[in-house]
Amino acid sequence: MSENHARPLTGGCLCGAARYEAAAPGQPMAAHCYCEDCRKASGTGHCTHVVMPEAGFSLRGAVKGYDRPANSGNIVTRHFCPTCGSALYSTNNAMPGMIFLRASSLDDPDAVMPQALVFTSRAPKWEPLDPELPAFATMPSDAERQAMAEQGRG
């Protein structure tokens, strides 16, 4: 994607009943998360999230939400298609105004590239970790996230 991110990200569910478009200035932050909730919600060893401003997000079709407290105590709501069950995006009450798209639901999976690995301490042994990306045993601190942004990784 270009630095201006002129082209919005589009995606949807497996059956096509729910579709979205998301636009934001600049390159969106994407990360692989290996926490237990993300692994169980995805049915794989990790989940890849693309962090976007909610203001640039539009949805067509119905979705259902599932609320669950994260380890931090924050409520994460995972939104999915009630027909086919495809995971589409999540929100976190500690980050109002932000949306976390599931990279697996993007029409073009190469539109974003992960820039970090989080909760690697919870990655299963059979899940390979990318040695090229910054890895964090838990969630990176504000200072660590800022340092990544300054290095052009977020």
Image (cartoon, rainbow, N blue to C red):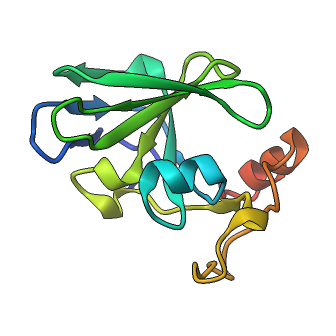
Nearest to the observer: residue 90 or residue 51: 90
Residue at 81 percent across and 44 percent down: it is 146
Q: Is residue 31 left or right of residue 16?
A: right
- Percent across and percent down for residue 29 are 57, 47
Compared with residue 47, is residue 94 higher up or lower down, i.e. above or below?
above
Q: Position of residue 19 (x, y in %)?
A: 18, 32
Going 27% across and 23% down the picture, which residue do you hit?
63
Whether residue 47 is visible, yes or no, is yes
Residue 122 as seen in the image, left or right of residue 83: right
At which x and y percent is residue 102?
Answer: 41, 46
In the foreground, 135 or 69 = 69
Whole-percent x and y of residue 100? Answer: 50, 36
Name the residue nearer the viewer: 65 or 93. Answer: 65
Left or right for 14, reference 65: left
Which residue is nearer to you in this view: 123 or 149?
Answer: 123
Q: Please identify the residue farthest to the left as the structure is shown.
A: 16
Q: Quadrant of the N terminus?
A: bottom left
Give the residue displayed 45% in from the left and 26% down from the top: 66
The answer, for residue 27, to whether it is visible in the render is no
Numbered circles on residues, count: 0
Residue occupying image coordinates x 29% and y 48%: 105
